[in-house]
Structure formats: structure tokens, C-alpha cells
Image (cartoon, rainbow, N blue to C red):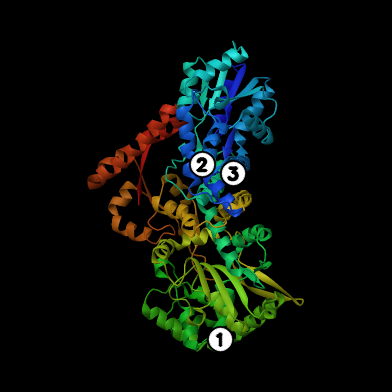
Amino acid sequence: MDHQYFNVCRMIDKYNVISFDIYDTALLRNVLDPTDIFDLVSKSLEKENIKLINFKKMRIDAEEIARRVSLNEDVTHEEIFEIISKKIGRDLAEIVKQKELALERQFTIANPFIKKVYNYARSKKKRIIFISDMYLSDIFITNLLKENGYEGFEKVYISGIVGKSKAMVSLFHHIKEDMQIVTPWLHIGDNLKSDYENAKKSGIDAFYYQRHTVRNKLSKKLSLERSIIKAIQLNKSETEKTNYWEEFGITTVSSIFFGFTMWLAERIKNKNNVYFLSRDGYLPFLIYQKVFPYIQGLPKPKYLFASRRAYQIPNLLNMSKSEALEILTTFNIDLGQNLSLGEIFENLNLEHSKYLELIRNFGFPDFNYVLKTKRDVSNAKELLDRIFPDIKSNLEKELEILKIYLKENGIYDQSEVNVVDIGWRGSTQKAIMDITNIPTIGYYLGTTYNVYEDIIDKVNGYAFNLGKPNRNKKRIMDNVMMYELIFSASHGTLIGFNFENERISPVLSESENDAVNNCLSYIHNGILKITDEYLKYFDYIKTISMEDCLEDYFNFIEEKRYEDLAEFSKLRNVVGIGKSEIKQNYVSEVTIKEYLINKQQINQQISKNLWKNALIIKGSISDLHLLKKYRRTTINLINADLKRKIIKAIRNPKKVLYFIRRKVKSYYFIRN
């Protein structure tokens, strides 16, 4: 962004006259397709009990007819609605026309990047004009520019008013004559033909400002709600300086949180309470606070410190001993989890030194021993059974403090408790209900088929509930840690509570994962920033579908683009309950030689990565002869990538120079 800014500013220095295209350059619409405005007109009219059947088609057809019968190179808004008035009557046509203008105004924003360029041109005392191939009037566009902070320009030229267009080149010639321009002139615009090539044909120098939809290759037709949200995302991320993680938050995962919050709000409206459980409820809590003023009847939110360790472990007292021992020795092999004897004892606050001799009697050499076999698990259960009185004593103390904490937060004052978390099995919800004997309802991103039986009718899942639909469940649970990452708070995990001086305070783990916390800070900042923009269009996007909200992250995870893998390869995270310190990779990196020698072992390893099967294979050109049967696949991938970069290089040679130099030195191969 800075590089592009300095380039265009250097060009501005050489010219006396600077002209700007308007839409998709100086001004942006918060819809991806201009015709989406017509859909908005229909929806807005319906709220006023005015129903026009297929207005969008009527509006598009009317514009086409107006162009066919016009003797000029472009048409005006008035001419278009003159044709519409013949179908629906003049009075109604006037109402619809004003509605369209109002929505154009509401969905138009300034482009911060071009505004910065514009301000630079003004500071250099340049003559500034605006030019557009557009049907809206010059008066309307002039006011729109001023409303969005563009002041001090000389004139606005609109093709529909002048009757000449950039597309036919004649508008440039008309402006030269009208303004008697004889000095050097630079035009800045987003249309390769009209703004760049045709300006050049007219003897005007030009700067091609590439549109967001072109840069992001968005060609698929989207729902109206998603069109608005994607436009807001791109207009923010593409025109303001952000780092990788903030942009990731804005463009890739923010819609999940907005959609989840809208879904949640509908279900807890008019309820008495809602508790967001730490850590995975932290960001939903912040977004709910932003949404709260927009929806009547929502309960005020509270953030409740909670974790499986701090709630489920004390709640073992409400289970049979066999159930308790099962939970204490369970770990998820599919996620690559390990469980050492030391972790079990630490989660139960049992001093190692007191039991060292006893654990050896059960076949464990020390507390670092990791449970590997069914026999290990069986021995661990027998060991824990032997010392269960000690375990019970510790748990009774913890449970008493936990009850005080829940009472302080008003849980015992409720006839029904509503909790929000990322989900899966509902263990913390069950613990709250078991401990308080108060019906507790859970609201989650998703719940699996093995939800605890006594809460199976009290769970609600946004993306999937009780494992259905299976397609969503599989896509999320196959990469469950990718979702746990984006829902995580940057503060430590709750381990338990201290009770000192008649006060309860949460005990959080000391996080040493600076890389993850740093990225979470940027992700949250991006999500919260873009949520403020979403809320400006709340009435238009509040019904966005769950499928629309999930699609970006689904695609992100499945595509495994190199630039994303490279950033995630810098992260490692903990998988486990309580005081676990075992960290795992999101993405693995190996050399070509390593992959060829240990292919099977590496494939097994990466299937347990926190981003499943995410792998970067690196190597120099001298390594390519080792590829053997993989050679063709690798070279094809490399060549395809180079081809894309070379195409970009034609438009911007300097931008791709670094990439080509790097490619000459080393290649990469991404395994999906």
C-alpha cells in the first residue's frame, strides 16, 4: 500500500491537472456489485408495504432500453426512471428513484487510500477534477464527494449529463476543450480500458488503480447479505494498512462471529441472563456487547471465568468413581494429545514428592512418564483409585470455592442459566448444572453427537448440533484447533480460584506463548474493528445465513495457500486440559530430502497438526533431481505459481522482482 502511494505521488508531482474516477476509485460501495443496490431498494420498499415484483430486473431492463433509444453515449438517472414510470406510474417511480438515491448515499464511503492521494494532490496545489461514466447527476455526485470529505476540487464531469463517455474516449476530449487544458494531465482510475488505455489514447497519462474485486478475484455471485459483508471487509482491508493477522481477522473469520452473535441473539431474546464462558467466549462476549444496543430484549452479558479443568475436575464429586477415573485419564490421540502422569497429578493439585514411591509400585518410573498403552491407562486408574481419598479432599476444597464464585456472579439467583462457549460436548455446562442443580442451557458454535445425556435437550449448536449436519461437523472437527485458535482469548487459561481475605480471584495460567497471543491481539482487533462497520448496515445483514458466514474459513483451511501456511508455521499451541505444556505445530516444515526419506512418517505426523495435513516442503534447485516420481507434480505446481506471478509482473514488474529472485534460489512445494 505504501509503495503504491509513493509511486502515484511521484507521478502527481509531474502534472498540473489531476483527475480521479469516482466509483471504485475515489468512492467505494459497500456492496460487491452495483446492481445489489437494486435488491436493497426492493427490500427497503417491502418494509414500507410497497411490493414491486422483480424490481432488479425491471431496473436493469429500463437502463438497457434507455441506452438503446438515447442519442448520447450515456444516459441519465432521469431517463432511466422515465421508462420505469411507464410501467409503475410516475408517482411510484419518483418514490422508488428517491429510495435508490438514498441507498446509494448510505452505501457509499470514501476510499481512504485515494483520499490520501487526493489530499497530497491538493497540498501540491494541483487542479483537481472528477470524471465518471455514470447515470447519476453531477449535483448528486458532487454532494456525495463532499459528504465523504472531498473538498476543493474544480469540477465534476458525468457522462450521462455531458452525453460523452470515457468508454468512447470523447469525454476526455470534451474536458480538454471545456477547461482549456494545455498543461500535463494525469488521470487515476480503476477501469483498465476506460481509465487507463483510453486516457492514454487521448494524450493523457494514467495510473491504473486496480479494483478490489479484481485483486481478490471475487467472481462468484453472492447473497445480498454476503455481498455487503465482503464489500465492507475488502473496502477496509484493501484501503487501510493492516498486518497479516489483522487482515485475517477482517476478511476470513469476522463473519463467523457476526453470524454466531446474530444467531445467539435470536435465541436468548427476553431471557434473564447470558454468561459467556472464558476463554472461548471472550470474543463473542465483546461482539455481543457491540450488538446489544441494536436488539431489544437482550439480557445484559456477563463474562464468567471457566474452563474444563476448573469446573469439570471439581464436578467429579458428582459422578461415580469409575466415571471420574475415566475422565482423569482420557486424552485425544487424534489431536496428537499426550498425557503424562505428572499432568494428572498437577491437575489434581497433588504433590509429586508424596507419591513418588507409590507410582513406582504401579510400574511408572517417574512423573514424566507419558501414558502410551491401554495397560498404562489401566495402571493409572488403579493408582488414582488407591489415592482417591486424597483426590476427594482436594476436590471438595475446590468445589466449595467454585460455588462461592458462581454465587458471587449471580448464578444461584437464576431459575435458568444460559451459557455461551465454543462447544463440542458441553462439559462445563454439565458441571454448572450438576453443581448448582439449576437448569443450564448452552449455546455453541457446534456440539458433537456424544453430548452428555443429561443435557442433550439443553444444547444448541450454530454450525452443527449433536453432530448434524455432518458436513459442517466434519469440516470443523477435522481442524478443531483452527477454530479453537480464533475463539481463544489472549489471557491465560483458568486453572482454579484463590480464596483470600474473603475474596475469590481466578488463577490463570501464565502464558508463555507470545507468538499466539500476539496474533490473537491482531485478529481480535481486526474483528472488532470490522464489526463496527457491519453494524452501520445492521438491518441489511442481520439475517445473513450460517453457510455464508462459515464459507470463508472453510475455504481458507482447505486451500492451504503458501502465504497462509508460512504465517501459521510460526505458531505452536497447547492441546490439553489444565496445566499441560505440550505444544504442537499448526504447520510443519521439512526439506525435499527429509520428505522423500521419511514420507510415511511425515504424513502421519502432519495428520495430527493443529492445521490438519498442513505442510511446507522446501528445497533448493539442486534438490530437484531427488524428486523422482514427485518431480512432475512439484514442477507443475512451481510453474503454475510462477506463471501467475509473471502475469502480475506484466502489470507491476517491481512488485514481483523480489519473488523471482527468491524463486531462483529456492523452490517450495505445498502438500495439501
Q: Which residue is nearer to you in this view: 495 or 124?
A: 124
Q: CA distance from mark 2 to mark 3?
A: 10 Å
Q: Which residue is nearer to you in this view: 227 or 256?
A: 227
Q: Position of residue 505 (x, y in %)?
A: 70, 71
Q: Which badge, 3 or 1, is on the more N-terminal residue?
A: 3
Q: Are marks 1 and 2 in contact (CB under 8 Å)?
A: no
- Label 1 sits on residue: 318
Q: Residue at x 48, y 55 (%)?
A: 548
Q: Residue at x 61, y 83 (%)?
A: 435
**Amino acid carrying mark 3 in the image:** Leu
Q: As displayed, is residue 337 above or below residue 184?
A: below
- Label 2 sits on residue: 87
The image quarter containing residue 81 is top right
Label 1 packing within 10 angstroms: few (<14), some (14-19), many (20+)? few
Q: Position of residue 340 (x, y in %)?
A: 47, 73
Q: Which badge, 1 or 2, is on the more N-terminal residue?
A: 2
**Amino acid carrying mark 1 in the image:** Asn
Residue 629 as seen in the image, left or right of residue 343: left
SS for callout 1: helix
**Amino acid carrying mark 2 in the image:** Lys
Q: Quadrant of the N terminus?
A: top right
- Label 3 sits on residue: 92
- Most extreme residue toward the left is 629
